[in-house]
Amino acid sequence: MTNAVAGPIRIAIVDDQQLVRAGFRMVIDSQPDMSVEVEASDGEQALRELARVPVDVVLMDVQMPNLDGIEATRRLTALEHSPKVVVLTTFDNDEYVVAAISAGASGFLLKDAQPEDLLAALRTVYRGDAVIAARSTRRLLQHVGPMLAGASTVERPQLPDDLTPREVEVLAAMAHGLSNTEIAEKLFVSEATVKTHVGRVLAKTGSRDRVQAVVFAYQTGLVQPEDLLGG
């Protein structure tokens, strides 16, 4: 991602359904600060195109022919100057969402999300945050929570000893899908203070971004899937 370079947010849309790509393109290209630079119908085509045309954010479907979105995400995020990846999903393939997040995706978005949610997600990821607090994502967390909790197949990780009680509170709030603004209101602190806590949580848990920290919170058992019911 190249926030330092002035200009519109460069977007790639990767989905095997042409109508889906056309719909997303119509919404994105209506914005003066965004531009669709790449379209691809599968992971292989996406990797080829993105090797030629740099973008900032990739909207990535997970179920595609030839090379699926999970492996494509893994390869993209392994690059030195990798774009951010937002996974496109539906409620019937939650297990793919967990795999894609583990592969390095910075968030996930329902395919039937409202246009304003899509645009907000793209801007959020471009700024360096993860898409974890949108209304659709919060509902999706209720579905993927149980799988996140069981995602550690070897040994359940432990919370780092150097996490302060306040940082544990912040991590739990992140795992419940709260934004920095909402966490600040909940804890009666400034948003700047929350950002500082979030940065320390990411560093101490070894998380690449907010989404990875949420996965970690579920794997440690800090947050239980049932905590999200009715949230």
Image (cartoon, rainbow, N blue to C red):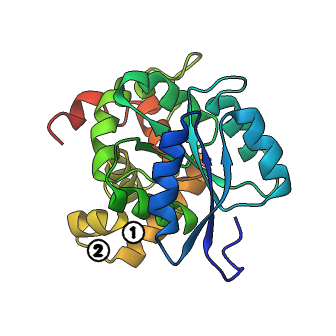
| Mark 1 crowdedness (10 Å alpha carbons): few <14, some 14-19, many ≥20 | many
- Which residue is farthest top? 153
Specify the amino acid type for callout 1: Val
Disc 2 marks which amino acid?
Val
> In terms of image quadrants, where is residue 225?
top left
Task: State left or right for residue 143 relative to residue 54.
Answer: left
In the rendered image, the residue lying farthest to the right is: 52
- Closer to the camera in the image, 164 or 90: 90
* Image coords of residue 167 (percent x, y): 41, 57
Q: Mark 2 points at which residue?
A: 189
Residue at coordinates 56% horizontally, 53% vertically from top-left? 209
Q: Is residue 9 left or right of residue 191?
A: right
Which quadrant: the C terminus? top left
Mark 2 closeness class: few <14, some 14–19, many ≥20 residues within 10 Å: few
Q: In which quarter of the image is residue 186?
A: bottom left
Residue 194: give its label.
1
Is residue 161 something one can see in this rendering? Answer: no
Do callouts 1 and 2 mark residues in contact (Cβ within 8 Å)? yes
Residue 98, position in %: x, y?
A: 50, 30
| Residue that appears at 38% across and 41% down | 110
Q: Is residue 167 visible?
A: yes
SS type, badge 1:
helix
Mark 1 to mark 2: distance in Å? 7 Å
Estimate the x, y position of residue 41 in percent, counting from the top left: 65, 37
Query: Which residue occupies the foreground of this view, 12 or 200?
Result: 12
First reached walking from the N terminus: tag 1 or tag 2:
2
